[in-house]
């Protein structure tokens, strides 16, 4: 005599989902034109493959050191990234390198105790960051924090050039929660 087991529908659905999640899939972008990333993450370019060979750092930046061995990659913010972030504040600061402008943008109010709010694009995804002290707290560099990261801007010399907002030489050091860090050399510009 053969016995039959009755499987609950919930268990069956869970098994199908688990198998589907572990199965290799082929991406079909045409099949999901409505798919949009979460509001806090806007992909601008596909993330680097885990099997890709790390590229040597460009002039003005170091290689990633420490952590789990994965590279820290910052991409230049686009006008769409900045508009989508909807940053508020009277004045702003940005960090740029000759290769990428800007890598970080933050806005804050003058003479405010409210945090300055900013964005960076990490491996193609726009992520929010904040620093204490509003605009005034960013003038001579700042320490920003966000999900799993700390970003330190250190001004390394006097402002060069004229105008209302001349850039100062600076470094941006990105520190990841797993202990990895990477430094870029560029300029820090604050003003209107």
Image (tube, helix red, strand yellow):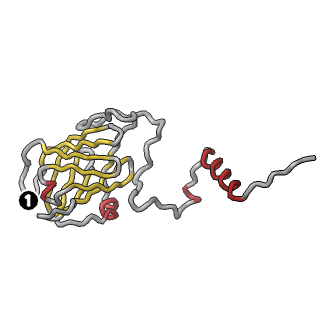
Residue 6 image point, x, y percent: 79, 55
Q: Which residue appears farthest toward the right when viewing the image?
A: 1
Q: Is residue 132 left or right of residue 27?
A: left
Q: Where the C terminus falls, by quadrant? A: bottom left
Under circle 1, the secondary element is loop
Q: Is residue 8 left or right of residue 129?
A: right
User: Looking at the image, which is closer to me, 150 or 36?
Assistant: 150
User: Looking at the image, which is closer to me, 20 or 29?
Assistant: 20
Q: Is residue 165 left or right of residue 33?
A: left
Residue 162 image point, x, y percent: 6, 54
At a point 65% along the width and 47% down the height, the residue shown is 19
Rendering quarter of residue 57: top left
At a point 40% along the width and 37% down the height, the residue shown is 70
Q: Residues within 10 Å of mark 1 (few under 14, many from 20)?
A: few
Residue 99 image point, x, y percent: 26, 44
Residue 53 image point, x, y percent: 43, 33
User: Looking at the image, which is closer to me, 58 or 103?
Assistant: 103
Count of numbered circles in the view: 1
At a point 45% along the width and 36% down the height, the residue shown is 52
Residue on which disc 1 sits? 164
Rendering quarter of residue 84: bottom left
At a point 67% along the width and 52% down the height, the residue shown is 16
């Amino acid at each position: 005599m053969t016995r039959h087991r009755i499987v609950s529908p919930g268990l069956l659905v869970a098994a199908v989902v688990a198998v589907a999640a572990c199965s290799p899939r082929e991406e079909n972008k045409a099949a999901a034109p409505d798919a949009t990333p979460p509001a806090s993450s806007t992909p601008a370019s596909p993330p680097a493959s885990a099997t890709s060979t790390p590229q040597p750092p460009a002039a003005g930046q170091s290689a990633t050191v420490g952590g789990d061995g994965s590279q820290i990659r910052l991409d230049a913010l686009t006008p769409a990234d900045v508009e989508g972030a909807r940053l508020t504040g009277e004045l702003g600061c940005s960090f740029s390198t000759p290769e990428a402008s800007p890598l970080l943008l933050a806005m804050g109010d003058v003479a405010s105790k409210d945090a300055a709010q900013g964005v960076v694009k990490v491996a193609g995804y726009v992520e929010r960051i904040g620093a204490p002290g509003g605009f005034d707290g960013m003038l001579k560099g700042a320490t920003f924090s966000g999900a799993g990261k700390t970003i330190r801007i250190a001004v390394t010399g006097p402002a060069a050039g004229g105008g209302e907002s001349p850039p100062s030489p600076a470094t941006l050091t990105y520190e990841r929660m797993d202990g990895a860090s990477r430094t870029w050399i560029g300029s820090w510009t604050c003003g209107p």
